[in-house]
Amino acid sequence: MTEEFFEILPVKKTFAGWHEILSDSICTAGQLNKFLPIDVKTVSRVAKQYPMRINPYYLSLIRKTMDPVWRQSVPDQMEIEDSLCAEDPLSEEVQSPVPNLIHRYPDRVLFMVSNQCAMYCRYCMRKRKIGRPFVVNDDTIKEGILYIGKEKAVRDVLISGGDPFLLEDEDLEKILKQLRDIPHIEIIRIHTRVPCTLPQRVTEKLAGILKKFHPIYINTHFNHPMEINSESAKACCILADSGIPLGCQTVLLKGVNDDLSIMKILMRKLLMIRVKPYYIHQADLVKGTGHFRTTIDQGIEIMKALRGYTSGIGVPYYMIDLPGGGGKVPVIPEYIKGENSGRLIVENYKGKIYSYPLADKSTDS
Ligand SMILES: *Cc1c(COP(=O)(O)O)cnc(C)c1O
């Protein structure tokens, strides 16, 4: 049995600074048509409803029509045909005591500090807000920080958006400093897709700022091995060298990564760029994203194909975020098959049955 051997491939093109890359982003069907064979009318119609932004770096990862990078970034007719899903299925707005701050769990909050992203993912869970004039400004940020300061039970702040790394260094530093000054905040987590979609944004200067506010954790977001190359590896390396543990939240997406071997390669490649797979998310029931949905069974099959077959540290949890704001729950393949005369019947990763002797309850003291 031979296994494939992977390496991180170099990106041959050289890219400008991140501001320049971002300002060269493609936002209209006409611009995009210069690079990709699209149906201009369709893309234009969809982009009117759900804005498009594909920066030149992410665009350069597209290899062919409807490949996994294309599907994540190019507007699709299906987005405006989706009639099943809701705008805000996770009731984020209801659980926001102040604008742009979601307080769902007692000890942690999700704080949106930017409404911009380096690329607008077509399956975005905040499709209702992102890339539109949803207001993040000094006032909402101030209000959020005040709220966190008053809520003594909050010990963990997830800085999210949009993408927090689309803020200028100084603005991000100001937010981090104010959060660090709150005595009950133990950890700060930054949720960013920049290492994947605009790795050039991760500079030594940014890392120098971040490491002043430890303990900082970063969860990034890669969905396909095509997104992992020398540029993204470099971004993750800069962050990891600054002492920041890196996790990844992958979204299970039809036509992108709903495939056992693709997911296994992705998890292995993430470990190679020093990122620990944290969650695989079942796609949320967000309006305009229904065509990305997979079955739960597919997710369970993927988890079965990972556990035992690749490094344990490369096996994330598969999560469903419950509609109605119930929070996330893990969906775990069933390895325990039952109990028989004091023995637990357990199936191993290869499907072979073993029994494990249970402690005798009657001898409990
Ligand atoms: C996912 C999420 C969190 C964090 O959940 P963890 O399981 O701790 O990573 C917190 N708040 C909200 C609103 C979330 O959606």
Image (tube, rainbow, N blue to C red):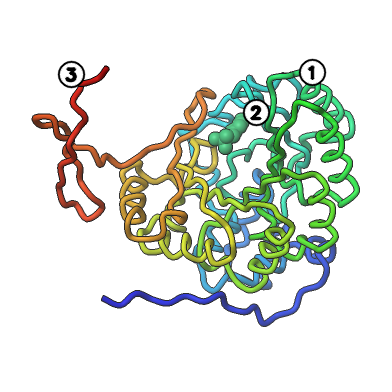
- Residue lying furthest front in this view? 365
Q: Position of residue 91 (x, y in %)?
A: 58, 24
Q: Position of residue 251 (x, y in %)?
A: 50, 48
Rounded to the nearest whole Å, what is the CA distance between mark 1 and mark 3?
50 Å
Residue 256 in sight in this render? yes
Residue count near mark 2 (Cα–Cα under 10 Å), binned few <14, some 14–19, many ≥20? many
Q: Would you name the residue on which mark 3 appears? A: 362
Q: Position of residue 332 (x, y in %)?
A: 35, 40
Please tell me which residue lies in front, 69 or 325: 325
Q: Which mark is residue 150?
A: 1
Q: Residue at x 70, y 44 (%)?
A: 190
User: For the residues carrying marks 1 and 3, which lies nearer the camera in this image?
Assistant: 3
- Element type where label 3 sits in the image: helix
Q: Residue at x 76, y 35 (%)?
A: 134
Please tell me which residue lies in front, 258 or 348: 348
Please tell me which residue lies in front, 135 or 7: 7
Q: Which mark is residue 201?
A: none
Taking the image as shown, residue 30 lies to the left or right of residue 145, namely: left
Residue count near mark 3 (Cα–Cα under 10 Å), binned few <14, some 14–19, many ≥20? few
